[in-house]
Every structure is written in structure tokens, then in C-alpha cells.
């Protein structure tokens, strides 16, 4: 019968790929509200164009907005797509 070997945990439940990571878009002087809204609605699941416009307004008025919180792998994927579309991104951060 095979023996199960338990290895010590190297990090807490919020380390590595687990836990929540934040994707933050920052305000800038070169992206239009429409471009930000359309990019968000095409990239982030569940974000409509109307919601994208509201987020773009929040980015404009406060300087930045969290547009996604979730697992690191997905956060990195969305961060890369938004960055490639020309949005100004904050570094990915753990929640």
C-alpha cells in the first residue's frame, strides 16, 4: 500500500496562485473614456459597456480603480490584456 507523505506548508492560504490579486487601472492623459470602457467590457467578464463607463469615470475622478480581484493567474491574464490595449496599469498587487 503506498504511503502518503505530508510536506510542510511553505505559505499561507493567500500565497502563490491562491488568494485574491487586484488588477488596478490608473488615470492617464492619453486614453479616452470610451476606449477604457470598451477595453474593460471586452476584457473583464461580466463588465458591460455601461459598467465600463462608470469604472472609467471612477478612474478619472479618483486616479485609479480596481477592475478585477481574483486568482493570480487570471489577474495576470487580464492585466496583460489591459496593458496591451494601452491602459495605464498599476503593478499587480495581492489583496
Image (tube, rainbow, N blue to C red):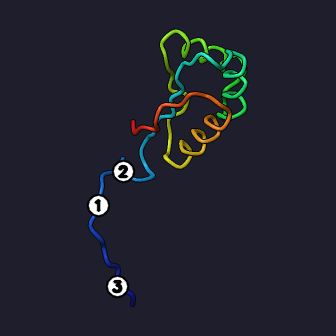
Q: Residue furthest top?
A: 61
Task: Give the class, few, some or many, for how many residues have Cα within 10 Å of label 3's Cα (few <14, many ≥20).
Answer: few
Q: In this view, does 69 lie to the left or right of 49?
A: left
**Mark 2 and mark 1: Cα distance apart in space:** 9 Å
Task: Give the class, few, some or many, for how many residues have Cα within 10 Å of label 2's Cα (few <14, many ≥20).
Answer: few
Element under disc 3? loop
Q: Position of residue 59 (x, y in %)?
A: 54, 16
The residue that label 2 is drawn on is: 15
The residue that label 3 is drawn on is: 3
**Which of the two labelled residues, at mark 2 and mark 3, occupies the earlier sequence position?**
3
**Mark 2 and mark 3: Cα distance apart in space:** 27 Å
85 vs 8: above or below: above
Seen at 57% across and 38% down, the residue is: 79
62 vs 41: above or below: above
Contact (CB < 8 A) between labels 2 and 1?
Answer: yes
The residue that label 1 is drawn on is: 10
Seen at 61% across and 36% down, the residue is: 83
**Which of the two labelled residues, at mark 1 and mark 3, occupies the earlier sequence position?**
3
Q: Quadrant of residue 81?
A: top right
Contact (CB < 8 A) between labels 2 and 3?
Answer: no
Q: Is residue 31 left or right of residue 10?
A: right
Q: In which quarter of the image is the N terminus?
A: bottom left
Task: Give the class, few, some or many, for how many residues have Cα within 10 Å of label 1's Cα (few <14, many ≥20).
Answer: few
Depth-wise, is mark 1 or mark 3 nearer the camera?
A: 1
Q: Which of 79 and 5 is in front in this view?
A: 79
Amino acid at each position: 500500500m503506498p504511503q502518503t507523505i505530508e510536506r510542510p506548508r511553505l505559505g499561507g492560504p493567500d500565497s502563490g496562485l491562491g488568494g485574491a490579486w487586484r488588477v488596478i487601472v490608473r488615470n492617464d492623459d492619453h486614453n479616452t473614456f470610451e476606449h477604457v470602457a470598451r477595453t474593460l467590457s471586452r476584457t473583464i467578464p461580466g463588465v458591460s459597456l455601461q459598467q465600463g463607463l462608470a469604472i472609467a469615470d471612477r478612474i478619472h475622478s479618483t486616479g485609479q480603480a480596481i477592475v478585477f480581484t481574483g486568482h493570480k493567474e487570471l489577474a495576470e491574464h487580464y492585466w496583460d490584456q489591459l496593458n496591451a490595449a494601452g491602459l495605464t496599469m498599476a503593478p499587480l498587487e495581492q489583496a
